[in-house]
Image (tube, rainbow, N blue to C red):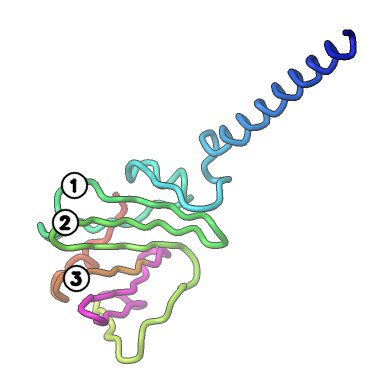
């Protein structure tokens, strides 16, 4: 009977220890989101800096076709931290942002955007894309809006 009692005690202590380790594992992401790798949905732009380590840029001009709803915001932490902000309604506006070196190259024939030294604008498959560097942050914009709207959106990119 004593052997059974000690086995039960051992299993109870083991269960508690594993539970504490699991809570610590889950709690680390809540307490320090910068230590979590992978993709995390973020509720609003205010919390992005804590998760991404930088303040994303948002357009102060957004055509009504992108809707009035809150955007979907995803922070992905891998070798390079990215922030993706997406507005969806009648039209879609998608911004992918990161700091550091460019992750992609514009296709040959892409046009520069006049007010930005490091920039490109091009169309592909019915979508307009822009790649621009603003104050050390790279922004890759993809949308089904017309090019004139894309130029206005890029010109108004600022921190929130």
Would residue 15 be counted in the magenta stretch? no
Q: Which sits in the foreground, 76 or 135?
A: 76
Kindly give the residue lying farthest to the top in the view shown.
1
Of the numbered discs 1 and 3, the one sitting upstream in the chain is: 1
**Residue 46 at x, y percent in the picture:** 35, 42
- The local secondary structure at tag 3 comes to loop
Residue at the image position 31 percent from the left and 80 percent from the top: 120
Please give left or right for residue 88 compared with residue 23 in the image.
left
Residue at the image position 77 percent from the left and 21 percent from the top: 11
Residue on which disc 1 sits = 69
Q: Which sits in the foreground, 116 or 24?
A: 24
Query: What are the residue bounds of the magenta stretch?
Result: 115-138
Residue on which disc 2 sits = 89
Residue on which disc 3 sits = 144
Of the numbered discs 2 and 1, the one sitting upstream in the chain is: 1
Kindly give the residue lying farthest to the bottom in the view shown.
109
* Mark closer to the observer (2, 1): 2
């Amino acid at each position: 009977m004593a052997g059974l009692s000690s086995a039960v005690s051992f299993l109870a202590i083991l269960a508690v220890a594993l539970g504490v380790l699991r809570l610590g594992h889950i709690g680390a992401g809540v307490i320090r989101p910068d230590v979590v790798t992978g993709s995390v949905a973020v509720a609003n732009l205010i919390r992005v800096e804590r998760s991404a380590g930088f303040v994303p840029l948002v357009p102060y001009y957004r055509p009504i076709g992108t809707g009035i709803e809150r955007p979907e915001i995803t922070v992905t932490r891998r070798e390079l931290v990215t922030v993706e902000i997406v507005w969806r309604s009648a039209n879609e506006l998608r911004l992918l942002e990161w700091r550091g070196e460019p992750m992609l190259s514009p296709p040959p024939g892409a046009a520069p955007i006049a007010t930005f030294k490091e920039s490109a604008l091009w169309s592909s498959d019915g979508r307009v894309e822009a790649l621009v560097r603003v104050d050390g942050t790279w922004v890759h914009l993809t949308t089904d809006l017309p090019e004139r709207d894309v130029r206005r959106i890029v010109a108004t990119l600022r921190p929130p």
